[in-house]
């Protein structure tokens, strides 16, 4: 086998291993009729991010590195309010990071048109508040 062929085989193997290692961060595709066009989420709670990160660190101290958390950083716990949101939430609820306080988040209110910044945070120790809360940051939204 020539050096260029060996390099090609090695590159493909590394690519496959890398893709497999990050497979949990890739969303499953939806058919056009199943695609969640209108996810609606219900706000379960809004808590200072420091409190949630501290609880998570106690349960898994090796996963969390040094994380700088500002006073306005909060963890919004959301649940699904319709089937489209159910398709997108891997569990019954999850935390989303928001960096401007809890003032506008009343438990029970509905989040519409949620625009999320979603990071793949599968390598620890995590050192960012967004990853410490699961990887999703709420950027913009409507509340009903």
Image (spheres, rainbow, N blue to C red):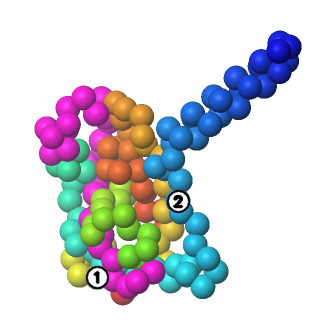
| Residue, disc 2 | 27
In the picture, measured across the screen, residue 79 lies left or right of residue 115, that is left
Q: Residues within 10 Å of mark 1 (few under 14, many from 20)?
A: some
Residue drawn at (58%, 66%), measured in percent from left and top? 29
Mark 1 lies on a secondary structure that is: loop
Residue drawn at the location 38% of the way across and 85% of the way down: 82
Q: Indicate the secondary structure of the residue bearing disc 2.
A: loop
Of marks 1 and 2, the one in the foreground? 2
Query: Which residue is drawn at the image coordinates 28% and 82% (left, top)?
Result: 109
In the foreground, 25 or 44: 25
Q: Position of residue 53 (x, y in %)?
A: 23, 44
**Horizontal side of residue 72 vs 83, given as left or right:** left
The structure residue drawn at horizontal position 64% and vertical position 80%, both measured from the top left corner, is: 32
User: Does the magenta-highlighted stretch encompass residue 111?
Assistant: no
Q: Position of residue 46 (x, y in %)?
A: 23, 65
**Is 79 part of what is drawn in magenta?**
yes
What are the residue bounds of the magenta stretch?
Answer: 55-84
- Residue highlighted by disc 1: 109
Using the image as rendered, state which of residue 1 and residue 87 is in the foreground. Answer: 1
Image position of 38 with respect to 119: above or below: below
Residue 65, horizontal then vertical, whole percent: 30, 29
> Which quadrant would the C terminus be assigned to in this image?
bottom left
Q: Earlier in the sequence, mark 1 or mark 2?
A: 2
CA separation, marks 1 and 2?
Answer: 27 Å
């Amino acid at each position: 086998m020539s050096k260029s062929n060996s390099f090609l085989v090695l590159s493909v193997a590394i690519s496959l291993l890398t893709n497999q290692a990050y497979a949990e961060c890739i969303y499953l595709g939806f058919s056009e009729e199943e695609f969640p066009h209108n996810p609606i989420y219900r706000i379960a709670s809004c808590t200072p991010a420091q409190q949630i990160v501290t609880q998570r660190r106690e349960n898994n101290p090796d996963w969390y590195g040094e994380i700088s958390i500002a006073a306005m950083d909060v963890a919004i716990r959301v649940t699904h309010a319709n089937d489209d949101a159910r398709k997108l939430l891997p569990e019954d609820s999850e935390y989303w990071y928001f960096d401007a306080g809890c003032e506008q988040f009343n438990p029970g209110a509905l989040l519409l048109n949620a625009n999320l910044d979603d990071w793949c945070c599968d390598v620890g120790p995590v050192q960012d508040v967004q990853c410490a809360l699961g990887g999703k940051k709420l950027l913009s939204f409507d509340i009903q």
